[in-house]
Amino acid sequence: VANASAVDGVAHVLPTPTAAKTHITSTLRCTYAGAFKGTYSGSDSGRATVFNDSSTALITGFGYSVIANEFFNLSGTNAIDFGLGTNFVSGSVTTGSSFSGQFSSPDNAVGSWSHPLGSSGSFSLQRIGGGIGASYRFTGSFSGTNQGLFTFDLSNSDQVTGVAYDIYDDATYSVSGSLNGTSLSATASGSGQTIQINGTMNKTTGALSGSWVNAGQATSGSFAGSGCQLN
């Protein structure tokens, strides 16, 4: 520290162990945060979409069983433990199943699922969205007439790009828009549909919330999530 100060004339202070740990944890949480979708198989099979909350590192989202023809919610049980190989656990209150997985990279996760009655299998998830060069990443789940995830990448000029995934229709939409202060205005387009998204996105606090409307299908609802600074 003294040598660095002698070179640039700036007083450098080493962070405390607690401050260093907090910084590393928040950086890792942001790197792995975002939206993911994939499939599960075994005694049952279907699709799943989850988001890794940047503020809690809990994995939450939705699933759909092809065999039972029903949807279910996934709630984070154990947050990602970056000291134990990026493991996580998420469970379904509806079905009683538990999904235990591990991130093999910030963009991919694999694992196994089990049910108290003995059924089991495996799953894999891949990141959706995640634009290169984004300064901030915000992700949230939407509910209402349909359910799914929004993921927003925010540039230095407050331009928004991203992806919306509707697990009900198994449809993916491209998102574009802008941020004015904390006011978010965006449009999700795809599959012949247009979804208007309006809400609040706060770069300082990481808060995300708002509403969505698909006038063409007369569907609507709300969304909420979190975000963090990447660069």
Image: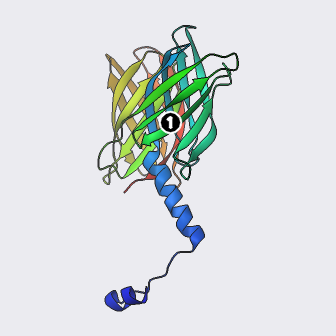
Query: Height in image: 14 above or below 168?
Result: below
> Which residue of the protein is positioned furthest toward the bottom in this rendering?
6
Residue drawn at x 51%, y 14% as measured from the top left: 45
Where residue 161 appears, x then y in whole percent?
33, 39
Where residue 231 appears, x then y in whole percent?
36, 57
Q: Which quarter of the rendered picture does the N terminus lie within?
A: bottom left
Examine the rendering and report whether any part of residue 217 can be seen. yes
Locate residue 190: give its quadrant.
top left
Q: Amino acid at mark 1?
A: Phe
Where residue 145 appears, x then y in whole percent?
53, 18
State left or right for residue 106 relative to residue 118: left
Locate residue 114: give its quadrant.
top right
Query: Height in image: 102 above or below 167?
Result: below
Where residue 87 appears, x then y in whole percent?
55, 42
Q: Which residue is mark 1?
A: 51
Task: Return the residue nearer the eye: 41 or 186.
Answer: 41
Residue drawn at x 40%, y 50% as measured from the top left: 136
Locate residue 71: give its quadrant.
top right
Query: Height in image: 74 above or below 47?
Result: below
Task: Return the residue nearer the eye: 220 or 13.
Answer: 13
Residue drawn at x 70%, y 20% as measured from the top left: 116
Task: Return the residue nearer the eye: 224 or 210.
Answer: 224
Examine the rendering and report whether any part of residue 204 can be seen. no
The colour scheme used to paint the residues is rainbow
Describe the element under mark 1 as helix, strand or loop. strand
Crowd around label 1: few <14 · some 14–19 · many ≥20 (10 Å)? many
